[in-house]
Image (spheres, rainbow, N blue to C red):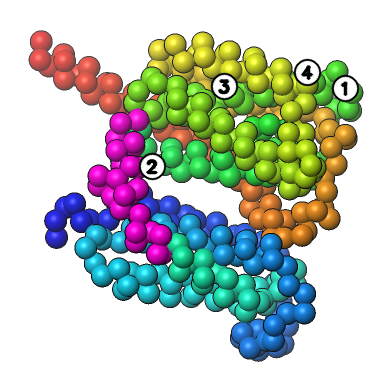
Amino acid sequence: MNRNTLPSSLPRNLAIAYAALMAYACLYPLAGWRDSGLPLFDYLWAPWPRYFILEDFLFNILGYLPFGFLAAAALPAGRPAWRGVARITVLAALLSLGLETLQNLLPSRIASNLDVGANVLGGLLGAMLGIRWGQDWFGPRGIIHRWRTAWIIGGRTGEAGLVLLALWLLSQLSATDLLFSSGNLRQLLGIAGPLPFSPERFIAFDTALTAASILAVGLFARCMMRARNPLPIVLLLALGIAAKSVATATFFEPSAPLAWLTPGAERGLAIGCALLAAALLLPRLAQHALAGTALLGATALVNLMPDNPYLAYNRQLAQLSNVLNFHGLTEWVDSLWPFAALAYLSALGLWRGEHLSAKAGERRQGL
């Protein structure tokens, strides 16, 4: 087989990771398993539901569309298109059927044949789009490959960094009004805040948290980049702001997607961007150390700061769709992301240290 027809490992890895995320979102909260006593597959022959929510139907289609696209992009080029679409559609159907059937064992979930149909449709549409444009994006000469070669360090180290950045964007869809915050173990474990609320205290914490988070995420992205051009970092932060606005409109105020822009967040944005611009001029080693320090600082701040009582979580609004169950996934990602990022930075620093030591040894031997 020609090397140019070999599938890229990136879309395959992304498809596997996305399937795992879908499984978690569909089976959340992963507690209370029990046998209802009814046949597991009875839901497949159930009549049309009396209450039909269009948002849920569209959500189930869109949820499987990226999976179909990525799976199609991972297929070798030159194969019959219809065969690839058929295989991926069957794979999406088996995945959906398995997850919906497992929902029969969860008291908080309801298995639905309509959801299976929507998932299969989403997988089919994604596969068709992936067959048509997957190689243009993920092929050996595709947009992603060219961009990654030009901007991101090579090998699995670069792929792991890209996955972590994608998870960071996912974490911004969690139901929290704090911009770019992550690592809130106190909220995950249901622990009360250690400090009482006061406007001055909250603004000060919010300012410091936002500034530290911008510095941490921006330098984390810089550590896995080849070039010094700040454009990808600016784009990453803009996508994070867009994701936070979507989450705010979904979980808090649908008419005010920018409700997260508190006085503290506004000041933190200005300070954080100024600090990041200055830090991008530093040597790579200093940026690496500063990224880890900022991550630790932001994680400590988010666990110490008082809760904001003025922006209440709108559970009734979130329950209008599957977004509430999706929040269970984003909450875990949001809470654990900085620790995974710190581990990555440590491994990356160790790899670079060994690489530099090896180069130094080669130079000494050449003298």
How many residues crowd mark 1 within 10 Å: few (<14), some (14–19), many (20+)?
few
**Dot placed on the residue nearer the N-terminal end, 1 or 3:** 1
In this rendering, position of residue 236 left or right of residue 189:
left
Instruction: Of the two numbered discs 2 and 1 on the same chain, state the one appearing first in sequence.
Output: 2
Q: Are marks 3 and 2 in contact (CB under 8 Å)?
A: no
In this view of the protein, which residue sits in the foreground, 119 or 187? 119
Q: Secondary structure at mark 1?
A: helix
Point out residue 1 in the picture as x, y percentages from the top left corner.
Answer: 14, 60
Q: Which residue is mark 4?
A: 204
Dot 2 amino acid type: Glu
Picture disc at residue 199: 1
What residue is shown with label 2? 159
Residue 193 vs residue 216: left or right? right
Secondary element type, mark 3: helix
Q: Residue at x 40, y 69 (%)?
A: 88
Residue 130 in magenta stretch: yes
Name the secondary structure under disc 2: helix
Q: Is residue 329 visible?
A: yes
Question: Which amino acid is tagged 3?
Answer: Leu
Q: CA distance from mark 4 to mark 1?
A: 9 Å
Whether residue 220 can be seen here: no
SS at mark 4 in the image: helix
Question: Dot 4, crowdedness within 10 Å: few (<14), some or many (≥20)?
Answer: some
Q: Which mark is residue 215?
A: 3
Q: Magenta segment, which residues?
A: 127-151
Q: Main secondary structure of the magenta part?
A: helix
